[in-house]
Image (spheres, rainbow, N blue to C red):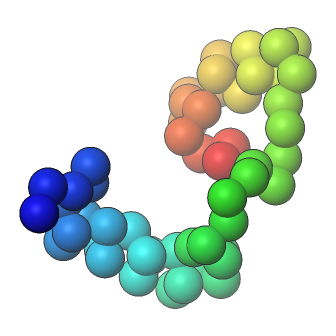
Amino acid sequence: MDFLCPQGEWLSSYKRCTEMGIDPSITTPLIILNLEGFRIKNSTEQGTHRCF
């Protein structure tokens, strides 16, 4: 069976989410950024991945 995401990577992500108290089954973002908010988050040294 072919998976879109390697299973070990998926399990690791699931574990990280639960350890941080994030519900790993979220299907929609908790925060929706408008374009200006995205630009501000993207311009920080942490990058966009930290805002999700």
Residue 9 falls in image quadrant: bottom left
Residue furthest to the front: 1
Above/below status of 21 relative to 47: below
**Mark count:** 0
- Side of 21 relative to 3 (left or right): right
> Which sits in the foreground, 8 or 18?
8
> Which sits in the foreground, 35 or 8?
8
Residue 40 in sight here: no
Residue 14 falls in image quadrant: bottom left
Q: In the image, what residue occupies the spot 21% across and 69% down?
A: 7
Residue furthest to the left: 1
> Which sits in the foreground, 37 or 6?
6
Q: In the image, what residue occupies the spot 57% across and 73% down?
A: 24
Q: In the image, what residue occupies the spot 52% across and 86% down?
A: 19
- Side of 3 relative to 24 (left or right): left
Residue 41 in sight here: yes
Q: From the image, which quarter does the N terminus lie in?
A: bottom left
Residue 21 x %, y %: 65, 83
Residue 4 x %, y %: 26, 49
Residue 33 x %, y %: 84, 30
Above/below status of 43 relative to 22: above
